[in-house]
Amino acid sequence: MQSRTTHHQRVLAIDLRPQQFGYAIFEGEQLLDWGACYFRPGGAIGAASAGKRVAKLVKAFLPSVIVVKKVGRKMTLNSPGVEPILKAIRREANACSIPVSLIARNEVREAFREFRCTNKYEIASMLASMHPELLWKLPPERKFYESEHPSMTTFDAVALGYTFWHRSTTELPPPN
């Protein structure tokens, strides 16, 4: 059971990809910062580069928790460089005594189901309406033959932060 102060925590949400990660910093429901970090792919070099960038975010924002998208088996097999990056993030979190919470893609979809969002673009649009400062980064809806827009990793990180906040507030006991 989460404590009642969970929704006031500072959360660093990270959407991890093989050559980049999107991040979002929340304090409660307030979005403080967001963006994407790019790094060289591949094993130790990519992990070290990503770890340094996460260290800078941790130092700058002092999060209470780091939320990371759970890496699926398919991504681990197709992009073996992702696992060392996740380990580097865990090392940085352990060095600063910050807990790491993993959130699966289906948990994100469940959190946005109440808004009737059925795909990533609808979730991104909902987030842009909740946080108008993101509106300028919202890409056009993707056609089936197009690759994903690079800014979607930022929206995926914001969705992770929202999901963490939503999950922790729904786990709170009812007030007396």
Image (cartoon, rainbow, N blue to C red):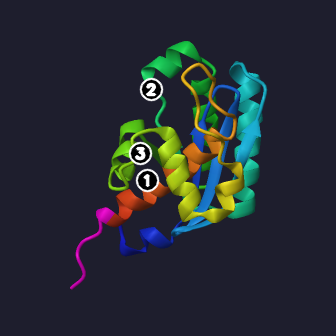
The reply to whether the C-beta atoms of the residues labelled 1 and 3 are less than 8 Å apart is yes
| Residue 31, percent from left and from top | 61, 64
Left or right: 48 in relation to 2: right
Quadrant where the image shows the N terminus: bottom left
Does the magenta portion include 89? Answer: no
Q: Residue at x 41, y 45 (%)?
A: 108
Whichever of labels 1 and 3 marks the residue nearer the N terminus, that label is 3
The residue beneath circle 1 is 163
Q: Is label 2 or label 3 in front?
A: 3
Location of residue 45 by image quarter? top right
Give the residue at mark 2. 72
Res. 98 visible in picture: no
- x, y percentage for residue 148? 62, 29
User: Is 174 included in the stretch rendered in magenta?
Assistant: yes
Instruction: Please give the range of residues in magenta.
Output: 170-176
Residue positioned 37% across, 74% down in the render: 4
Q: Quick one: SS at disc 3? A: helix
Q: Quadrant of residue 128?
A: bottom right
The correct choice, above or below, for 3 with respect to 115 in the image is: below
Which element is circle 2 on? loop
**Can you tell which of label 1 and label 2 is closer to the viewer?**
1
Which amino acid type corresponds to the residue marked 2 in the rendered image?
A: Gly
Question: How many residues crowd mark 2 within 10 Å: few (<14), some (14–19), many (20+)?
Answer: few
Pointer 3 residue: 108
Query: Percent from the top left, x then y, of residue 3?
Result: 36, 70
**Which of disc 2 and disc 1 is earlier in sequence?**
2
Tell me whether circle 2 and circle 3 mark residues in contact (CB < 8 Å): no
